[in-house]
């Protein structure tokens, strides 16, 4: 009896002893982390390849990935955080990163970065890396970026005898070219860009304007610079008619008309390069025109680590890998999954060598002029209202001056400024 009891105790102690060696995870000697993401290509192959490479380089860490559709992603993530069940690491775009950093749900990664001898911030694009800083500290690791350029139909330019866009073009240069390229009889328009708040804050910056003052305590939307910027945007549709109106689009997207050879210059994102590979005409890209200065969109995704995670070090290692590891960058480029934030020309060379477009350098040149969207709590609500005001201008029911005055009043009310 005593021998049987002793044997049972040995077995029990052995089981507890083995469990104690598990590092708090359920997979033996491996630390398991959960990663939420939304941006990987739908087939999942690129992300699977990255995770396998990470686990190969870090055999003591296992990554459990949960992919959530973008439209549901932030609702799901916020629910998990509010319920005290946040994933260890999770993907954020720039706008939501700032909101989460302000809410205090992200871990400060500064000390992990300082201790990590393998991570060198200088290998990353500085603007992209700094975009995930908050209050002077690094709360996120940039993993990828994309931006907007002017994509143009070379065949239409050749047919009209118009010089191709150059990096020093101004609004006037583009307007002059657009007028020569527009062929109303054949429904061909010289240019196209959205007349929405997400476009307007960039166009305003091209004219020295802004939506808010520097410390976000006052709106500057109703300024002379911004009136000129909105007039520039809307006149292309309503006055000179060098850009298609909502009625002209008839439910189609501008990129569809571009593919049909009906738009000569399209202001849009580099994510459409793949779509245009099958275009039945020659095309290329250029840095967008400015007026008093250059300004271009910048979109970035990064990875944050939950401040409540008990596996922060492992989560940081994964975020660092996705941000700066050369193998991860190569996988991203091979799969056309946005662009890694690396400064390594050798890694980027396959992207630069791919054609069309020939002038892929414009993508990186545009980074010099990047502007970030204002990050305020009610940005979506403000944008919806302002978009409705812009639409009235396009429909001939308002003016740029009235639209911006009404938008100013709305922002003051929404933000509680006055």
Image (spheres, rainbow, N blue to C red):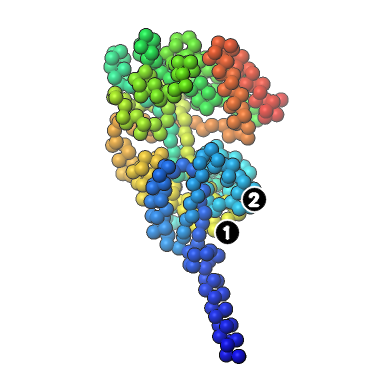
Q: Of marks 1 and 2, which one's residue comes earlier in the chain?
A: 2
Single out the residue that lies furthest toward the bottom. Answer: 2
Binning the other alpha carbons within 10 Å of mark 1 as few (below 14), some (14 to 19) or many (20 upward) gives few
Residue for point 46% across, 27% down? 295
Residue for point 57% across, 78% down? 12
Disc 1 or disc 2, which is closer to the eye?
2
Residue 9, position as x, y percentages in the image? 58, 82
User: Nearest the camera: 32 or 95?
Assistant: 32
* Quarter of the picture holding the N terminus: bottom right
Residue at the spot of label 2? 83
User: Nearest the camera: 304 or 225?
Assistant: 304
Binning the other alpha carbons within 10 Å of mark 2 as few (below 14), some (14 to 19) or many (20 upward) gives few
Work out whether 91 lies above or below 355: below
Residue for point 61% across, 14% down? 402
User: Nearest the camera: 174 or 178?
Assistant: 178
Secondary structure beneath label 2: loop
Residue for point 40% across, 25% down? 255
Query: In this rendering, does residue 402 appear at all?
Result: yes
* Quarter of the picture holding the C terminus: top right
* Number of residue marks: 2
Residue at the spot of label 1? 310
Secondary structure beneath label 1: loop
Residue 163, position as x, y percentages in the image? 31, 17
Residue 162, position as x, y percentages in the image? 31, 15
């Amino acid at each position: 009896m005593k021998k049987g009891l002793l044997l049972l105790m040995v077995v029990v102690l052995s089981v507890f002893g083995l469990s104690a060696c598990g590092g708090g995870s359920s997979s033996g000697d491996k630390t398991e982390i959960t990663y939420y993401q939304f941006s990987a290509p739908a087939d999942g192959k690129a992300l699977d390849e990255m995770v396998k490479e990470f686990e190969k380089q870090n055999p003591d860490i296992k990554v459990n990935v949960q992919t959530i559709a973008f439209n549901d992603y932030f609702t799901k993530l916020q629910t998990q955080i509010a319920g005290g069940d946040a994933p260890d690491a999770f993907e954020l775009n720039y706008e939501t990163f700032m909101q989460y950093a302000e809410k205090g749900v992200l871990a400060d990664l500064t000390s992990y970065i300082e201790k990590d001898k393998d991570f060198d911030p200088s290998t990353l694009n500085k603007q992209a890396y700094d975009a995930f800083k908050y209050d002077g500290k690094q709360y996120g690791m940039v993993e990828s970026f994309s931006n907007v350029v002017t994509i143009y139909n070379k065949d239409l330019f050749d047919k009209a005898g118009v010089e191709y866009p150059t990096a020093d073009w101004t609004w006037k240069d583009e307007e002059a070219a657009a007028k020569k390229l527009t062929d109303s009889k054949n429904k061909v328009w010289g240019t196209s860009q959205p007349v929405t708040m997400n476009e307007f804050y960039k166009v305003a910056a091209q004219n020295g304007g802004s939506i808010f003052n520097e410390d976000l305590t006052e709106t500057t939307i109703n300024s002379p610079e911004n009136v000129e910027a909105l007039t520039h945007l809307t006149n292309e549709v309503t006055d000179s008619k060098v850009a298609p109106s909502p009625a002209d689009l008839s439910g189609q997207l501008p990129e569809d008309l571009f593919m049909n050879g009906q738009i000569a210059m399209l202001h849009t994102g580099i994510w459409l390069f793949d779509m245009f590979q099958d275009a039945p005409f020659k095309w290329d890209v250029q840095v967008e025109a400015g007026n008093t200065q250059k300004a271009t969109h910048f979109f970035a995704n990064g990875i944050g680590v939950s401040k409540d995670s008990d596996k922060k070090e492992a989560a940081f290692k994964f975020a660092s890998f996705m941000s700066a590891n050369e193998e991860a960058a190569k996988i991203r480029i091979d799969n056309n999954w946005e662009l890694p934030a690396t400064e390594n020309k050798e890694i980027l060379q396959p992207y630069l060598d791919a054609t069309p477009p020939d002038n892929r350098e414009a993508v990186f040149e545009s980074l010099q002029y990047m502007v970030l969207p204002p990050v305020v709590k009610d940005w979506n609500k403000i944008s919806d209202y302002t978009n409705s005001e812009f639409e009235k201008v396009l429909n001939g029911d308002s003016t740029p001056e009235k639209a911006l005055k009404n938008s100013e009043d709305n922002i003051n009310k929404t933000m509680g400024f006055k």
